[in-house]
Image (cartoon, rainbow, N blue to C red):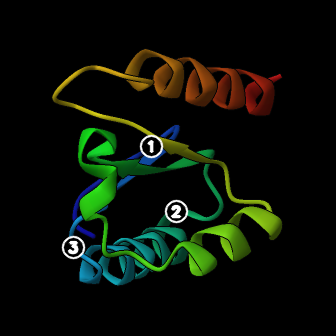
Amino acid sequence: MRGNLTSSGLILVVDGTRSASLEVALQVYQDISDEFGELPQMLVINKLDLVKEWKIDMQVIDELGQTGWDIIHTSAKTGESVADMFCALTRKMLSKSM
């Protein structure tokens, strides 16, 4: 990372129809954590409107959830659960700052 960047939270968006996007998101998370330390984060599995076409490994998603990751399924197209995701991340950020 460059400059004097700061962050209060992190949204990692995974395209449910592209299996490689999960691996990329996890690598991005690691890179950001190395730079900024632990941040409140949400792992967002997007394209809920195309759930029948998902190619991501749901076992990996379940395992991440069991290790403490906050995971939410959304559809940017329909807006489903998008507001819920922002509210959940905001609650995590506020609880960390208190």
Q: Quadrant of residue 49?
A: top left
* Residue under pointer 1: 7
Where disc 3 sits, the SS reads: loop
The one nearer the camera, 64 or 30, is: 64
The one nearer the camera, 21 or 36, is: 21
Bin the neighbour count of mark 1 within 10 Å (Cα to Cα): few under 14, some 14-19, many 20 and up. Answer: few
Bin the neighbour count of mark 3 within 10 Å (Cα to Cα): few under 14, some 14-19, many 20 and up. Answer: few
Bin the neighbour count of mark 2 within 10 Å (Cα to Cα): few under 14, some 14-19, many 20 and up. Answer: some
Mark 1 vs 2, N-terminal side: 1
Where disc 2 sits, the SS reads: helix
Q: CA distance from mark 1 to mark 3?
A: 27 Å
Q: Amino acid at mark 3?
A: Arg
Q: Amino acid at mark 1?
A: Ser
- Residue drawn at (62%, 26%) of the image: 88
* Residue under pointer 2: 36
**Residue 46 in the image, given as x and y percentages of width and height:** 32, 47
The one nearer the camera, 51 or 47, is: 51
Which is closer to the viewer, label 1 or label 3? Answer: 3
Q: Amino acid at mark 2?
A: Phe
| Cβ atoms at labels 1 and 2 below 8 Å apart | yes
Q: CA distance from mark 1 to mark 2?
A: 8 Å
42 to the left or right of 55: right
- Residue drawn at (72%, 62%) of the image: 65
Q: Is residue 81 above or below residue 22?
A: above
Q: Which mark is residue 18?
A: 3
Where disc 1 sits, the SS reads: loop
